Amino acid sequence: MPRPIINADECSACGICVDACEQGVLDIVNNVAAPVNEDACNACGDCMEECPMGAIDEIEED
Ligand code: SF4
Ligand code: SF4
């Protein structure tokens, strides 16, 4: 199961990834982007591509 990993130190809480994710996986929580609906992630990569800070990575999990 893929899931996005947000580097909180690099995140500016701009919200672009939240808007970019059509699956509703991401939200801003405590002033940082966070996966709130991880199971819905389809590994499309849109959040990573749109993040201006390069703060998002994605990892594969079984
Ligand atoms: S697009 Fe990047 S910098 Fe903006 S909220 Fe998402 S992770 Fe943070
Ligand atoms: S990889 Fe795609 S589905 Fe997964 S969190 Fe990012 S934008 Fe959403």
Image: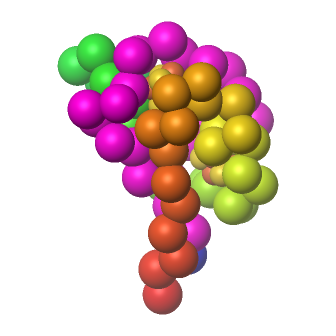
Identified at 72% across, 51% down, the residue is 45
Determine the residue positioned at 53% across, 16% down: 15
Viewer-closest of 55 and 1: 55
Number of marks in the rendered image: 0
Query: Percent position (x, y) of residue 36?
Result: 42, 41
Whether 14 is among the magenta residues is: yes
Q: Quadrant of the N terminus?
A: bottom right
What is the x, y in percent for residue 6? 39, 43
Q: Nearer the viewer, residue 37 or 34?
A: 34
What span is in magenta?
A: 2-26
**Residue found 76% across the figure and 55% down from its top:** 44
Which quarter of the picture shows residue 23?
Answer: top right
> Would you place residue 30 above or below residue 33 in this image?
above
Q: Does residue 27 sit above or below 47 in this rendering?
A: above
Q: Is residue 51 left or right of residue 35?
A: right
Residue 49 in the image, given as x and y percentages of width and height: 71, 39
- Seen in the image, is 36 located left or right of residue 60? left
Magenta stretch contains residue 32: no
